[in-house]
Amino acid sequence: MTDHAVVSHDEWLEARAELLREEKAFTRERDALGRRRRELPWERVEKEYVFEGPEGKRTLAELFDGRGQLVVYHFMFNPDDDWDEACKHCSFWADNFNPVIIHLNARDVTMVAVSRAQIDKIERYKRRMGWSFTWLSSYGSDFNYDFGVSFAADEQSSPVYNFGTLAPGRADREGVSVFVKDASGRVFRAYSTYGRGIDMLNTAYHYLDLVPGGRGEEGQSPQYWVRRHDEYDGGS
């Protein structure tokens, strides 16, 4: 960043106005894409999924908690014994959840996280991180497999992730699914997104995209620098 162009005030305003025109065009396209996303047809969820929470078992329909729309963050946390901690990258996203949920609730939206790990492992890690959002276990359920975020060993090197565009490379991957429940109690999937599709849900990334240093990931593995929030130097 030490070898960056420096110009006069008027030149800066001219360059900024040029970029603003591009930003406005992008905003209009983003709004149009959002409308197309909301207009997607729905898929009826026929199977009954049951999850384990700290207070017992709950079905997918019960996760709506009296609201009509449900956002599920597919949190990578493998039930195998060698996983004592959830994915640090998903944890980076989860640090954004608590503050927004009250606002989502006001717009008829419930948000939860779901992982394959057992509920006791989830609860221990959740306490460590200081989170209060609802986080449930799908242990023993087909939920993660049916919604494209968990994979058998023989699938992990094949393009079966992100609607057949990527090989998952591991047993669990990240994603978000949106569900809707109608007045009769029927549940539908309205949307799912995976991989880079969840970037929009990470507030820290949007701030980093504003500063000259950006995300600092060019030529590196994505999020190579990310730690759990209690693992940075000087962390809480």
Image (cartoon, rainbow, N blue to C red):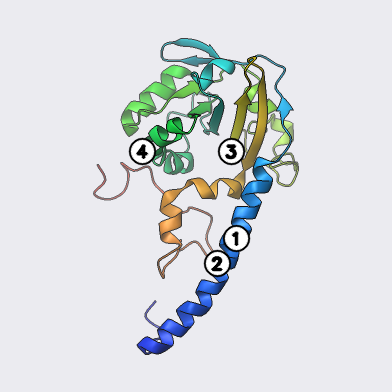
Q: Nearer the viewer, residue 102 or 48?
A: 102
Q: Earlier in the sequence, mark 1 or mark 3?
A: 1
Residue where numbered disc 2 is placed: 24
140 relative to 152 in the view: left or right? left
Disc 1/disc 3 C-alpha distance (Å): 25 Å
Q: Secondary structure at mark 4?
A: helix
| Residue lying at 64% horizontally and 47% vertically, measured from the top left | 35
Q: Earlier in the sequence, mark 1 or mark 4?
A: 1
Residue where numbered disc 3 is placed: 175
Q: Give the amino acid type for the residue marked by disc 4 in the picture.
A: Pro
Mark number displayed over residue 28 = 1
Q: Secondary structure at mark 3?
A: strand
Q: Secondary structure at mark 1?
A: helix
2 or 4: mark nearer the eye: 2
Q: Residues within 10 Å of mark 4 (few under 14, many from 20)?
A: few
**Residue 183 seen in this snapshot:** yes
| Residue lying at 39% horizontally and 46% vertically, measured from the top left | 227
Q: Give the amino acid type for the residue marked by disc 1 in the picture.
A: Arg
